[in-house]
Image (cartoon, rainbow, N blue to C red):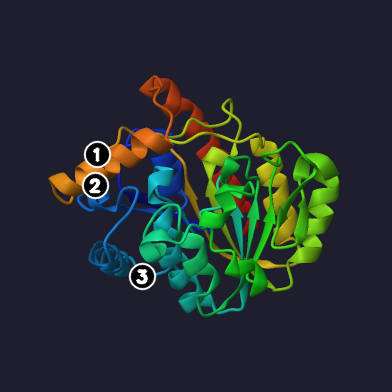
Amino acid sequence: MRSMILQLDGSLERQTELQRAALQGGGRILAARDLGPALRLWSTAQTLADLRQRLKTCPPEPQAEVVFAGSGDFHHVTPLLIERAVAAYGGPITVLHFDNHPDWVRQAQGRHCGSWVGRAARMEGVARVITIGVCSPDVGRGRARQGDLALLAEDKLELYAWAAPDGGEAVVLEGRAWPTIASMGEATFLDRLDAAITTSGVYVTVDKDVLRPQDAVTNWDQGQASLDFVIAAIRRASAGRRVIGADVVGDWSQAAYGAGPAAWLLKRGEALLDQPWGRPEPEAARAVNEAANLRLLDLFAELS
């Protein structure tokens, strides 16, 4: 699998070992930092259209592609990358979504980093999204009402939280109990995941905030999964199937918000409400995240 480094913020520019490994493997770098501030957290339809046009300057490779895209604040670019992969390789596919958050809220119609799952799940060629590893309160009974719960009734989403917000062994939504990974154990979950994927094609999206803090440093609150678990799950899901594409976000970067003073204030206010206030040491964050990215790069290269 070839790689692309999509530069929307400064996080990947400092990861020189990742860039070297990607380019040595035939990968490429697409500069898009000019679009980054307007894309960060949420975007207008026009800015996403501008990014779609920028991506067209790097047509899909003959083989599948893994895209590293920086902060999890940009996770709403994933539908563009799924669209690109499905157009090149066809469907139907299952989207495997590793994240500490369900990213299913209804606001901004898929243009928000927390609302892209509904859009992706209903795209042509996508059979279902399987979300893995959530620990955040977003799947609790109260907060879940903000989510696009129709996805469950439409059989377009399966949800396997790492832990339930109330401490129970399952997340209960729309009358269905979804056992947590912690309650069933990692090995049992991998068997269940394998059975849940009914398509021969798989697209993988990883937000590194699903990982415990020793494995990643992100702009968001983090989960409890180890990088070893995420890699094992991707290996299991890909066995006997084709990974048609992937993306990786979740690298910490200093936020910059564009699109005018009103948007800056709204985005800054949202970040203060939703994200941790502490600032990590940038070089330490870079080292931890680059190590994780290099392991994921090696994994996807192997799977191709």
Q: Nearer the viewer, residue 32 or 117?
A: 117
Say left or right for 275 vs 158: left
Task: From the top left corner, tell me how far across and down residue 210 is, in percent.
Answer: 58, 41
The residue tagged 1 is: 256
Q: Nearer the viewer, mark 3 or mark 1?
A: 1
Mark 3 and mark 1 residues within 8 Å of each other at the beta carbon: no
Question: Which type of secondary structure does the marked residue at label 3 adopt?
Answer: loop
- Mark 2 residue crowding within 10 angstroms, few (<14) / some (14–19) / many (20+): some
**Residue 166 to residue 148: above or below:** above
Question: Which type of secondary structure does the marked residue at label 2 adopt?
Answer: helix
Task: From the top left corner, tell me how far across and down residue 39 is, in percent.
Answer: 29, 53
**Quadrant of the frame with the N terminus:** bottom right
Say left or right for 290 vs 236: left
**Residue 251 to residue 102: above or below:** above
Amino acid type indicated by mark 3: Pro
Q: Which badge, 3 or 1, is on the more N-terminal residue?
A: 3
Question: Which type of secondary structure does the marked residue at label 1 adopt?
Answer: loop
Q: Quadrant of residue 153?
A: bottom right
Q: Which badge, 3 or 2, is on the more N-terminal residue?
A: 2
Task: From the top left corner, tell me how far across and down residue 269 is, in percent.
Answer: 30, 38
- Mark 1 residue crowding within 10 angstroms, few (<14) / some (14–19) / many (20+): some
Mark 3 and mark 2 residues within 8 Å of each other at the beta carbon: no
Q: Quadrant of residue 71?
A: top left
Asked if residue 257 shows in the view, the reply is: no
Mark 2 and mark 1 residues within 8 Å of each other at the beta carbon: yes
Q: Which mark is residue 37?
A: 2
The residue tagged 3 is: 59
**Quadrant of the frame with the C terminus:** bottom right
What's the distance in space between the residues labelled 3 and 1, CA to CA?
28 Å
